[in-house]
Image (cartoon, grey):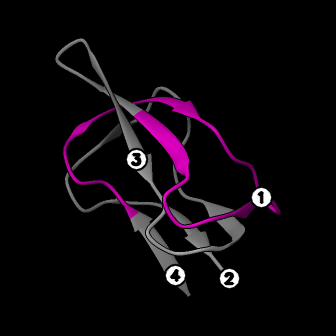
Amino acid sequence: MKQVKTNMAGNVWKIQVGVGDEVTAGQEVVILESMKMEIPITAEESGVVDELKVEEGSFVNEDDVLLTLK
């Protein structure tokens, strides 16, 4: 199971994919908000979204899992 993790702490501002969506490596999947800046999080590998681990508005720490791909 592939995982997309955060590279910093922040609030989940926007989730740009849903369960069952196909994503490609480099595609933006989540946008974090930290210190009034929007930080896009991209998938490192291609796959299909299996599970979303966060909700919009939730706080995440560095290395938290945002979603899984199969």
Residue at the spot of label 4: 2
Q: Label 3 sits on what residue type?
A: Ile
Which one is earlier in the sequence, the residue at label 1 or at label 2? 1
Report if residue 21 lies within the magenta region.
Answer: yes
Residue at the spot of label 3: 41
Residue at the spot of label 2: 70
Extent of the magenta region:
5-31
Q: Residue 14: where, in percent of width, then height?
A: 54, 29
Quadrant in which the N terminus is drawn: bottom right
Q: Residues within 10 Å of mark 4 (few under 14, many from 20)?
A: some
Q: Residue 13: where, in percent of width, then height?
A: 46, 25
Residue at the spot of label 1: 19
What whole-number distance in Å separates the C-alpha atoms at marks 1 and 2? 11 Å
What whole-number distance in Å separates the C-alpha atoms at marks 2 and 3? 18 Å
In what element is the residue under mark 2? loop
In what element is the residue under mark 3? strand
Identify the residue at horizontal 53%, vertical 67% (top origin). 25
Which one is earlier in the sequence, the residue at label 4 or at label 1? 4
Q: Residues within 10 Å of mark 3 (few under 14, many from 20)?
A: many
